[in-house]
């Protein structure tokens, strides 16, 4: 069981590091693109958001590939198993149950799912922040004013 915890933690840490790197790249690209002035700010906003989402999706694909490779290295499933599909199902928490790990590695799926949930949440936060900053730079939002309270 300890080997499962070590392997799951190691792959999770590698994926978190990859996601941190992609976050820096995505925010940098979005910041530089968002600072540009555009004749069509709404179209520009769409472009920034699409580019950010694509970069994050590529990161998730790499993270899933990392899990699939780990499954192969530790032989977490039967020899004829489609490890990429198995990693996708676990990472996205679909949980179809049509492929199950071998008994010695039954905790690898929950580790993968926990990692996926964390990184999907992180990606949602990045998308929201990029949206907020780009709207602010393009002047498509109003600055919050003082809140007045009615008696």
Image (cartoon, grey):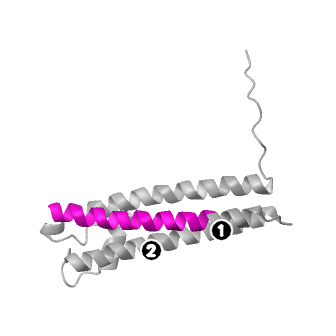
Q: Is residue 66 above or below residue 117?
A: below
* Residue at the image point whose x is 51% and y is 60% from the top: 123
Residue position marked by numbered label 2 in the rendering: 61
Residue position marked by numbered label 1 in the rendering: 29
Q: Is residue 95 magenta?
A: no
Q: Are marks 1 and 2 in contact (CB under 8 Å)?
A: no
Residue 81, given in percent of the width and then of the height, sits at 24, 81
Q: Is residue 48 left or right of residue 58?
A: right
Give the camera-side residue of 57 and 20: 20
Residue 37, given in percent of the width and then of the height, sits at 83, 64
Is disc 2 placed on a helix, strand or loop? Answer: helix
Residue 18, given in percent of the width and then of the height, sits at 45, 68
* Residue at the image point whose x is 33% and y is 61% from the top: 113
Q: Quadrant of residue 97?
A: bottom left
Is disc 1 placed on a helix, strand or loop? Answer: helix
Q: Quadrant of the C terminus?
A: top right
Q: Is residue 16 magenta?
A: yes
Measure how far apart labels 1 and 2 are at the Cα level.
Answer: 20 Å
> Which SS does the magenta portion mostly show?
helix
* Residue at the image point whose x is 33% and y is 72% from the top: 67
The residue sitting at the top extreme is 151
Q: Quadrant of the N terminus?
A: bottom left
Residue 60: in sight, yes or no? yes
> Bounds of the magenta span?
1-27
* Residue at the image point whose x is 78% and y is 44% from the top: 142
Q: Is residue 9 left or right of residue 54?
A: left
At label 1, counting other C-alpha atoms closer than 10 Å, the crowd grade (few under 14, some 14-19, many 20 or more) is some
Image disc number at residue 15: none
The residue sitting at the bottom extreme is 80
């Amino acid at each position: 069981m300890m080997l499962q915890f070590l392997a799951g933690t190691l792959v999770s840490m590698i994926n978190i590091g990859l996601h941190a790197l992609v976050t820096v790249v995505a925010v940098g690209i979005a910041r530089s693109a968002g600072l540009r002035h555009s004749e069509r700010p709404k179209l520009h906003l769409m472009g920034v958001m699409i580019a950010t989402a694509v970069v994050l999706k590529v990161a998730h694909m790499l993270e899933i590939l990392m899990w699939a490779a780990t499954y192969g290295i530790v032989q977490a499933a039967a020899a004829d198993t489609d490890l990429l599909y198995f990693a996708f199902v676990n990472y996205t928490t679909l949980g179809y149950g049509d492929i199950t790990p071998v008994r010695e590695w039954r905790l690898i799926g929950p580790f993968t799912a926990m990692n996926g949930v964390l990184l999907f949440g992180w990606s949602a936060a990045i998308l929201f922040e990029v949206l907020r900053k780009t709207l602010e730079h393009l002047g498509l939002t109003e600055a919050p004013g003082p809140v007045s309270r009615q008696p």
